[in-house]
Image (cartoon, rainbow, N blue to C red):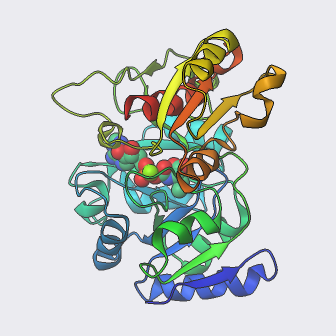
Amino acid sequence: MTTEVLDACISPKIAIARAAELLRAGEVVGFPTETVYGLGACVFNEGAVRKIYTAKGRPQDNPLIVHIAETHDVSRVARDIPDEFYRLAESFFPGALTIILRRHSDVPAIVSAGLDTIAVRMPAHDIALGIITATGEPLVAPSANRSGKPSPTSAQHVLDDLNGKIAAVVDGGKCSVGIESTIVNILGETPMIVRPGVITQEEIERVLGKNVAIYSGQETTQPIAPGMKYRHYAPQATVKLMASWSEILEEVHKNPNPKRMILSNEKAPPELQSQVYLLSPTTIYSDFRLADAENFREILILCSDTVQNNVALMNRISKAASGT
Ligand code: TXA
Ligand code: MG
């Protein structure tokens, strides 16, 4: 299969129309969102959804997120929708928040990997919203990477992983957020964040007027966010979390010449400056991909106070480090 590249920066209308045409024909298409690129398929087309799992090499027990362009479309994919959903939607849609609801019986079970729940979000991205609207149906879209690779934040990343395996990718430039949406489950007594993102626990608590828990990642008999158990977000290099520049210097002196990347949001000592890349949520995944492409052996990440206080960024960094 040749993967069409549809340039939405030059001609958004043509790109959106072609993407919608392919999606309605049961194909899968990569498209930009504000968080990361998604790999879309029509939610009610079981065969198309199956193609997503195949293209990504995704385990069958890892459910997908449904993307809607209008809040009222939630009733096409979910049932018994609690009032909290509408309060969160009012404040955060469109935006980087995914909400777990009860699945509508019209939605094929494969979308939720057999769970009776469904994850729903409305992306804050004109191209994504345009494609959903033009297709006329909510779209399931996991991140458009091969399973186990960092999420893609550009159309080139999608091609690097999936060229020849998907019908098309819509190029809408780089993603502005760079890490995946916050996922919150509002079905229990206490709402629970099962994946941290740029929309924070405090912001959700303010809107709901009650405490929100953050899933600790401890194993339970019933996995709460099935995707959390996989080795996501991890580059091939060994990732080490460092507390200070002196710790980094010690590591560098011990082992002067491996192919190494240093990530930090603070100014580096002069002797390290050439190896240091700016650490931020927006660029973390493209830096991991660069490290893979350049065959870096080691990635040292300086966990400054600001970095440690960024729950979503620390979550992705810790996962990358624990996988190696
Ligand atoms: O920002 C994002 O959310 C991006 C863009 C493309 O929208 N999508 C994304 O999808 O990150 P994916 O498939 O890479 O991650 C979906 C996560 C997985 O960890 C999965 O386990 C969880 O959502 N998930 C999906 N449905 C769920 C459900 N019903 N209950 C609990 N977790 C669910
Ligand atoms: Mg993913």
Residue 234 placement: quadrant: top left
Question: Which is more toward the observer, 97 or 271?
Answer: 271
Q: In this rendering, does residue 80 appear at all? A: no
Residue 298 position (above or below residue 108): above
Question: Which is more toward the observer, 71 or 263?
Answer: 263
Q: In this rendering, does residue 26 appear at all? A: yes
Question: Which is more toward the observer, 276 or 279?
Answer: 276
Question: Which is more toward the observer, 240 or 46?
Answer: 240
Decide if residue 212 is on the left or right side of residue 148.
right
Residue 126 placement: quadrant: bottom right
Residue 240 position (above or below residue 165): above
Residue 210, given in percent of the width and then of the height, sits at: 52, 16
Quadrant of the rendering where the N terminus is positioned: bottom left
Decide if residue 218 is on the left or right side of residue 244.
left
Quadrant of the rendering where the C terminus is positioned: top left
Residue 130 position (above or below residue 224): below
The residue lying at 29 percent from left, 66 percent from top is 106
The residue lying at 35 percent from left, 21 percent from top is 189
Residue 181, given in percent of the width and then of the height, sits at: 55, 43
The residue lying at 24 percent from left, 34 percent from top is 223
Q: Residue furthest left?
A: 221
Residue 282, given in percent of the width and then of the height, sits at: 69, 43
Residue 320, given in percent of the width and then of the height, sits at: 46, 35
Decide if residue 231 is on the left or right side of residue 164.
left
Decide if residue 281 is on the left or right side of residue 231.
right
